[in-house]
Amino acid sequence: MNGFLAALFLTSTFIETQGSLQGSFNKLEARPFITAGVSELHFQEEAVGKEIQLIYGREFRSGPLQHIIAVSRTDQAGNWGGYGFYNEIELGGPISLGFSFIPGVFDRNQEEDLGGWLMFRSGVEFEYDFSDVLSIAVSYDHRSSGDIWEYNPGLETIQLRFKYKLQ
């Protein structure tokens, strides 16, 4: 999975119906949101634990990319936090696909050794809007160093997310 989700994120920026990166990096307004999620962690294709994650979608975007802040903690006391980008593509009606890319720092504690402290987290999610303010999503993401550390095994999460869109 190394690099595939990051490439998928980049591709999503060129097909966005609200304007692509080809159009501009101008700072535009965005609807802020808060997302809470619970995950199952997979390391070397084995389930190894659980994680909780919080994401705050900022009130602005650069072209189609909404700025986001994310933090997570695993049941093995692994901590991760980062600042990155989210791109949402509406598929019609209440259904959309979301793509994220978030560079961040990793404090391992008792968690699996991922090779270093700088980790890139890229993901894809399938989202369903219940209303104008509430939605649910299933997501998959991959976290690794992008080969900047010699040892780079990666960690995957399968997550259920609940999103509250702020006014």
Image (tube, grey):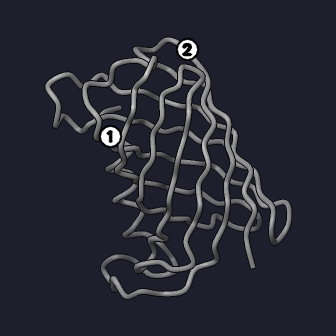
Q: In the image, 80: left or right of 23?
A: right
- Decide if residue 111 is on the left or right side of residue 138: left
Q: Give the residue at x 53% y 14%.
A: 48
Within 10 angstroms of label 2, few (less than 14), some, or many (20 or more) residues?
A: few
- Of residues 107 and 95, the one drawn nearer to the viewer in this rendering: 107
The amino acid at mark 2 is Ala
Q: Quadrant of the C terminus?
A: bottom right
Q: Secondary structure at mark 2?
A: strand
Q: Is residue 148 above or below residue 130?
A: above
Q: Tell me what residue is drawn at x 53 percent, y 25 percent.
A: 77
Front residue of 63 and 112: 112
For this orientation, the residue located farthest to the right is 131
Q: Which numbered disc, 2 or 1, marks the residue closer to the eye?
A: 1
Residue 67 x, y percent position in the rendering: 47, 68
Residue type at mark 1? Met
Q: Is residue 87 above or below residue 140?
A: below
Q: Whole-percent x and y of residue 40? A: 61, 25
Nearer-N-terminus badge (2/1): 2
Q: CA distance from mark 2 to mark 1?
A: 20 Å
Residue 140 falls in which quadrant of the image? top right
Q: Quadrant of the N terminus?
A: top left
Residue drawn at x 69%, y 45% is 161
Residue 102: give its label.
Answer: none
Residue under circle 1?
119
Front residue of 142/59: it is 59
Could you say which is closer to the camera, residue 4 or residue 81? 81
The picture places residue 43, in percent across and down from the top left corner, at: 44, 18
The numbered disc on residue 47 is 2
In the rendered image, residue 24, in percent from the top left (x then y), is placed at 33, 85
